[in-house]
Amino acid sequence: MLYFFDKSVILVERGFITGGFAKNGGFIMEKIASFTIDHIKLQPGVYVSRKDKVGENTITTFDLRMTSPNEEPVMNTAEVHTIEHLGATFLRNHKDYKDKTIYFGPMGCRTGFYLLLAGDYESKDIVPLMIEMYEFIRDYKDEVPGASPKDCGNYLDMNLGMANYLAAKYLDNVLYGIGEDRLVYPGTC
Ligand SMILES: [Zn+2]
């Protein structure tokens, strides 16, 4: 994710190559960790997807799963894009987390987002931060930050109303009163 290997490895890391393995010439690539989670059992929640060591430091990747995979409609790109702009703006202005935020962005399957933070965390550690962030997105009614042709590659592709709605749904159904079953991947506890 953060390394620059050859192009095909980056494609696998970003999830463009699916299935048990991908072939690159004679080299067979292993299924990456995020494809080994049982997406049929996976419910909306806040999960630790992986932890990576970069030198002395740990980077924690969180799986912010907003819809139930293969079970309910995925989010449309416009609202995903709006949540990305609002979430990234929120995190990069946060008094405690602005310097720890490495990345926030959508999953290609449009069922959730990845958040990468510098540090070694458990999923419950970021629940207060996620409540704060999704309340910000739920209540945001102003012009979407960065939604201009100079700042964004597809600035008209925004849906603030649906971003507000989906943030409220994630708060009500998942974040408020979250339990262990929505904090640890199924089959791993
Ligand atoms: Zn954009």
Image (tube, rainbow, N blue to C red):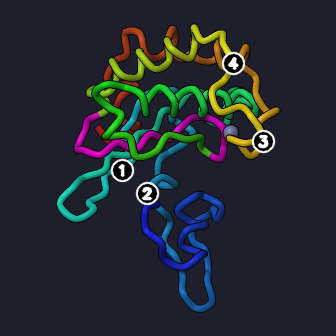
Say whether mark 3 is within 8 Å of ligand 1: yes
Residue type highlighted by circle 2: Ala
Residue linked to disc 4: 143
Mark 1 burial class by Cα count in 10 Å: few <14, some 14-19, many 20+: few
Magenta part of the chain: 108-122
Image disc number at residue 33: 2
On screen, residue 66 versus residue 146, left or right, reads left
Is residue 130 magenta-colored? Answer: no
Q: Please state, as top left, top right, bottom left or bottom right, where the C terminus lies in the image.
A: top left
Residue type highlighted by circle 3: Asn
Q: Are marks 2 and 1 in contact (CB under 8 Å)?
A: yes
Quarter-wise, where is residue 99 in the image? Answer: top left
Residue type highlighted by circle 4: Glu
Q: Nearer the viewer, mark 2 or mark 3?
A: 3
Q: CA distance from mark 2 to mark 4?
A: 37 Å
Residue ID at (41%, 16%): 131
Mark 2 burial class by Cα count in 10 Å: few <14, some 14-19, many 20+: few
> Which percent across, then down, holds residue 66?
56, 27
Say whether mark 4 is within 8 Å of ligand 1: no
Q: CA distance from mark 2 to mark 1?
A: 8 Å
Outermost residue on the left side: it is 56
Q: CA distance from mark 1 to mark 3?
A: 30 Å
Residue linked to disc 3: 154
Q: Nearer the viewer, mark 4 or mark 3?
A: 4
Q: Are marks 2 and 4 in contact (CB under 8 Å)?
A: no
| Secondary structure under the numbered disc 1 in the rendered image | strand
Residue linked to disc 1: 50
| Secondary structure under the numbered disc 3 in the rendered image | loop
Quarter-wise, where is residue 124 in the image? Answer: top left
Q: Indicate which disc, 2 or 1, sits on the residue closer to the N terminus.
A: 2
